[in-house]
Amino acid sequence: MASLQPPKLVARNVAAVRRFSDPLTVTRIAPGNPASTRLESGIGNCFPGLECDLRNLERRFFPFLEVDISDRMGLASVDSEGIAHARAAGTLSQADAAVYSTLASQLVAGRSVQVSRLAGDFGALGSLAVNLDLPDLNVGGDLGTPSTGPGRRPPDIWTAVRLLTEGSDVTLTFVRANGTQIATLTGKRARYLDDNGALAAAFSPGELSQSLCSPWTHDFRDCGCFYWASNHPDIVQPALPANTPPSQPWNAAVPWERGGPRTINTTPPDPATEDSPDELRHYEINNRWQELHFVVGRREITAPFVQNPVVGTPFADHAELMANLVYAAGVELAVAQEYLAAAYSLKPDNDASLGNPADLRDDVRAARAELLRIAIGEMRHIRAVNDVIRGLSNAGTFTPALRVASQLPHQPGPFRAVNPRAATRAAIADFIQIEAQSTGVDGLYNNILATLTFPPADVAPFVTDEWKQAIRSVIAEGEDHFETFLNIQEWLSNHPETAYLRATNLQKPPAGNAANANLQTAYVALLNNLFTGYQKGRFLGATEINAARAAMVGNTGIVAKAEAVARQNFLVVFDTPADARFAPVDAPGVAMV
Amino acid sequence: MADSIQALFVTPALAFARLGGSSTPQFAYDWIDTRAPRADGETSIAPAWTIAVQPDGSPAPFMPDSVTFRDGDLIRPVAPFYEIWARIGDAGDPPANWRDVPLTPALLQANGLALAALQIKVTAQNLKAARRTSNKQLAFGTFPPLAVSATNNARIPILGTSPTTATNPMIPVGRSIPLGSIQILRSVPQPGNEPWSDSVNVETLRFRYMPATGLFYGPPEAAQALPQNGRPAPAVRPENAFLNRNAGWRGTSTNDLVEPGDTYDVINQRQSPVQGQPAGRGPSLGVVDDTCEVHFEVSLQRGAALPPLTAKSVAFVGPPDFAPDRRPFLSTADELNDREADAAARNNNLDDAALDRWVQDLFERIYETVSLFNVDFNRREIQVGGHGATLPPGKLRANDIDGGARDRPTGAMGGRDALRNPLFKLPAPTTVDPLPLSAHARMRHRALSDLQSLIELVSLDQNRLRTLVRPPFEVEDFESPSTPATSMRMPPFMRQSNAQPLTLANWQYDLLMRWVDRTVQRAQLQGAAFAQPAGQPPPRKLSGSAAARRANVLARINAAAGTP
């Protein structure tokens, strides 16, 4: 599908901005050009680089001079023609021209000229005057590591030059090979780009790429370059065989530049490890680089890429959106309760019956841990949704959404009743469905996101990128929850329900059960903390929200109290408090059944 | 005359062209916010208006229905278009009053100029061998520059030869290395009723640079495999093994002008030229590639009385961007921005909303890089190819967060690293879950690519980002400067352009810290007292196989329980 939205470019990131350009146009793309033509697609840290080696810019940091920078700074050339033009234009003094002439004559005579001292404005490091290494004379300079904290000096000569502020005064001291001083010169730190954003005239064609690898495939091969992942990946998910869904074992990361044939077999390539991978070798890569796969969405692709957008249906207006957000928070609370009930229905670790078969105990432990993790993750979603509700509310009207949903989205549906129960196969299947893409919770959030993306008139003034991103993140985490429930299903599928459940038909504790009373009291306290915290806002309410989190997972928190109920072989169920703030909420437009 | 042409410029002024063997260039695509929210990452790619070049050189815009990177075995080259624009205004008007408009034949005519007055001079050079040998005769490219009139709409090959002054040319006389082509497109009247009419102006004068196909060239012996010399395959095809072996590139060892110095094809990969030096710095096999840097100088002759107007643009030719929906967090653009005088002013011009957008975009880019980064490999110690420093006592915590589960607890990002967040315990790599650190990094940065999560991070610990993100160009005393071994300060285990620990650019760091300060300030204005993280939520991990996930979960809960 073609792009229906503006390209993702942030004006501040755009380089090579023309000096007279309209700030509104700096992100314009010349029609016909893919994003990979843009400087934003190139890796900035070059050692030596893929498209160009920006260190070559520093070789012309001083007007009319070209220097070589390594463990020393040596003069490479003097632009006598440029000096003559500057003299004719009256922009260079006779005295400075004479110094340039002296330096040029040294080079013509085959004598080495080095820079022994550099003074100028080093940006964040301030104004400094530093002595440079003169290795041939065994003279050490002021630069080196460590380079930390206030008053630090640049760690090396290139960094020192790199930090100089364009247009500021720079003073260089030149010495002969024997260390005797030739002269000093002061000039402005040169501009590297011209008014139109192209390379300044001082740079000849080929200069910016002269220090790249020859051939370039060395950069693609050498292990020391494993830091250009954004267009030269270290690890990827392998290309899928035809008609194979993106599931295990095809989700494990493999080395992208792996050696061997790149045919797509019925089994995936060996997974990547922390050891050096078996890569395409030097020389070999020269003839095989076009076999490397392109990678989109972290997966190698072998066919044209088409994104299959998931677009919900926008709600009609602000009121409908807000009602659905309140319901979404309620759904998060309800599914968290279902997941907790399921987690505590699993036999405890020390249950003797978990010893056979050998892996049963670990299957149960892992399943419980993941159920608890997801349940707590849903609590984060409640916070995110409340932040969005606050953002979409008129000042002073925000009320935290902590009412548990009375029904959950379901296929076929549209709804089912909230049903805390043991982690039976049916329950896990329900959990998978409610976290699946485009159904259940995901469908609800897609509609919310669509409303924020294509807002009706009364929503538009409230919409910010932040709220859209918050909803996107909730949706993205749904994918993790979905995959996790698939894993839990797989772990537990090897065992009969009676082998891992305390009981398949666990019941609520009877009235008057002390452990349950403790649990319900803690639950109400948790809701109260969250309500207060959300109402105060994300900064002022941090204390209450942290307290709520502690109450959830601490040694005396809800986790421990729920465990106490479960130990008595009861189902962990959270009663709805008799408080209007926490009263059940129906799906908008759906009456409670 | 109000529409008098005062100046020219070319857009883009700098662009990347990317090698590929297909004869069909890469169609246009844009980065967009993903419309599949459950996709990996926030950025995706979508087709954009593409310009097909007709046989007569005229542009024909169309919208592809997919993004296609290759045709069979061959990768599509990235061939940028460059538009020529004019700055127009009254004679004597200051530049601030000039307007930017596309240069068209009609505008030329209105200024009394013919299309033939417009010309492009093309200079393409590959100086790699020349630089490494300090021998300018080993440069190759356009000698002399190629001159193309705007009336010529043919596709003109750019052929690289040795300098005409070379007495012993590397490229034999009569041979050449193709370095791509240039084509000035034929301007045609702009229709008003096409779906692309608002997006593409086909009347604009533009040209396209098509890079070479990605071939390698060398002397005859480079076409031979020599396994005993560590050359398991030929470096070049037989038909490209025609370079002069005695020109000076073949047989020359590297000098110190290029760092790192071992990045070329050598005659013997297994033999060190100098005792104690790596073998990769030995005599060169004499191989060159068909990348180059191309400078385009557009000039407009305005008659004898006026000097010509000129404008310049550049193409850097490099390899494909193999992960086109992943963006670097320190790009070539970011680096150039850091060297420009207006960096501080551009930072200051960002209002709070723009700053929020920028910070979120930065962290999205960080995730996009991390998502393909093998953190486990790079975290290892130097001796086995990693970049993780061993920490001094002052950088260690007393207890091992990971409960002894992982190796190198005193290494960067180890269990005793004081910078680690104690809420997240990590398991050791296992057969079924070999890269737990990489998975953890993806999980954390996926969350932090949401501004809300970043705000929460700051609200819970106002110093966390300042502590964790390395200031520009900082190097600590225990971090090896030559073979970089770094702490876990962000970005960890990566090296910058001079092989020291990588950092954000100055302007990026300044903006990020401004955002942190503003966020803290906003919180304090609301009266918040910063709290330390409470509780101990379990780590949250993203996808993995059922077995891998299980092993991981068990490792996690075992570590939490202090059991083996």
Image (spheres, rainbow, N blue to C red):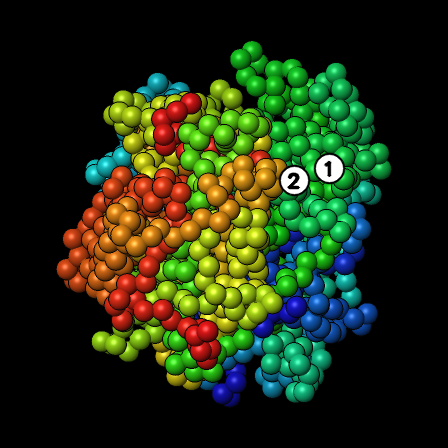
Q: Which residue is mark 2?
A: A249
- Given the image, what chain letter belongs to the residue carrying mark 2? A
Name the element at disc 1: loop
Q: Position of residue A237 (x, y in %)?
A: 62, 43
Q: Amino acid at mark 1?
A: Thr
Which residue lies at the image location 23% right of the left edge and 60% below the top edge? A528
Q: Which residue is mark 1?
A: A267
Asked whether the beta carbons under mark 1 and mark 2 sit within 8 Å of each other, the answer is yes
Which residue lies at the image location 44% right of the left edge and 31% below the top edge? A351
Q: Is residue A11 left or right of residue B300?
A: left
Q: Position of residue B484 (x, y in %)?
A: 43, 29
Is residue B131 visible in this depiction of the protein? no
Q: Position of residue B305 (x, y in %)?
A: 55, 76
Quadrant of the rendering where the C terminus of chain B is positioned: top left
Front-lying residue, B428 or A355:
A355
Name the element at disc 2: loop
Tag 2 or tag 1, which sits nearer the N-term? 2
Compared with A322, B347 (above or below) is above
Is residue B194 visible in this depiction of the protein? yes
Front-lying residue, A301 or B305:
A301
Q: Amino acid at mark 2?
A: Pro
Corner quadrant of residue B255: top right
Q: CA distance from mark 1 to mark 2?
A: 8 Å
